[in-house]
Amino acid sequence: MTPPRVAHKGWLLGVLLVGPFMAQVDATIANVATPSIHTDLGASGAALELVIGGYLIAFAVLLITGARLGQTHGYRRVFVLGVGVFSLASLLCGVAPSPAVLVLARVLQGVGAAMMFPQTLTGIQLNFSGKERSRAIGLYAVALSTGAVAGQILGGALISANIAGSHWRAIFLINLPIGAAVIAAARRYTANHGLPLINVEILARPAIRWGLLTLLAATGTYYALLFTLAQYLQQGLAESPLVSGLTLVPWVAAFGLAGQLVRRLPPRAIPLAPGAGCVLLTASYTAISAALFTGYHGEALLVPLLGVGGLGLGVQFSALIAHLTKTVPDEYAPDISGVSTTAIQIGGAIGVAGFGTLYLSLNANPGIHQATHAFAVTTAAFAGVALLATATAYRSTRQPTATHRHSATPKGAITAVGDPV
């Protein structure tokens, strides 16, 4: 099918960017709602972890499958189907009568996200080139970071507003009109063609393996932080969902700023930046833990330290992706995006399960002092994992970059998928 006219490219890009935006919003928005879900449905700590982790696991496991489906059936068709599944699952989440139904609906929502998410970069690659493509990919990164911010703010605002007595259910039901509009726009402005196959066997290089482990470990602490901080602020300190959502905004905003800073680094500094970002992340967690152990839990200290952590995670991610894409020939670099997204989602699921269980077990009898102690221990554990990520980042960036370029499409290849945030 003929690519869209230039006049429609702005609409095309806008439609494509809604996919990663929605997927990222729902990766973060439910964390703010977990205390409300616990109160309304009587969900246990394990069930709350599954509400978060079920989405992330389904997203991670099926992400590359979603990319393959886009190649074989056309990215528009799979994008529309993914948005439809995501919206239907959101409806099921919004009317869920029990924790079990909510968990199953969240898993289905993750399936929809895995179908729509990878089609965005496919559409960008097929319809944009040169400076237009660079601009589109830059806006793609903005959509991911703003999605994370929107999830925190919107979740807190909707729950606090309690529209028509909906409490936490509104955070899922809001996806219905958005999904319907996106499907209508996608059918008008996108074309249903596929993407050339790209080899992923080259991702077995040591630099890639160590880099993926770094992303899994570092970003796993972030998703765990989203979950445990919501429990700590709302149940331990009795803060409102809105305050809980706003508290992490400096983290996500600093993450977005980091990408712009890394872009301005000289090429020789890029290999040093991932480790430096992990050091900054470790320092942030350590400082938060130390402050909590001394009994200080005020927002005046917590908020800026979270900003430092977000900056560290963002520097690590942006610089590591930049380095890893240089370790493979140009035409294979997009697969770094897909595999790294998978590693991040798996890391998030593991982080929520492991660190969430740690926090909840230490806070069996909720109260401000016990909750503060539990969160102090948990953030100390975050610091340990971030320190481990520093070592793996160093191992990854010690590896040489690619010295040659290929143009053929080898046998056994798959389609490219999207960059994570």
Image (cartoon, grey):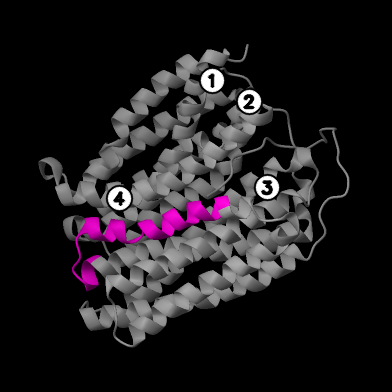
Q: Which mark is residue 9?
A: 1
Disc 3 is placed on an element classified as helix
| Residue type indicated by callout 4 | Ile
Q: Residue at x 42, y 53 (%)?
A: 54
Reading the chain from its start, which is encountered first: label 4 or label 3? 4
Q: Give the range drawn in magenta.
A: 234-260
Q: Residue at x 70, y 37 (%)?
A: 414
Q: Is residue 412 left or right of residue 3?
A: right
Q: Answer yes or no: do the residues labelled 1 and 2 have beta carbons within 8 Å? A: yes
Q: Is residue 251 shown in magenta?
A: yes
Label count reads 4
Residue 103 in view: no
Q: Which mark is residue 336?
A: 3
Classed neighbour count for the residue bearing mark 4: other residues with Cα under 10 Å, few (<14), some (14–19), many (≥20): many
Question: According to the image, label 4 marks what residue?
Answer: 153
Q: Which residue lies furthest to the left in this view?
A: 164
Q: Quadrant of residue 208?
A: bottom right
**Overall secondary structure of the magenta stretch?**
helix
Q: In which quarter of the image is residue 213?
A: bottom right
Q: Is residue 413 shown in magenta?
A: no
Rendered location of residue 299, percent (x, y): 28, 70
Q: Residue 128 carries which label?
A: 2
Mark 4 to mark 2 CA distance (whole Å): 32 Å
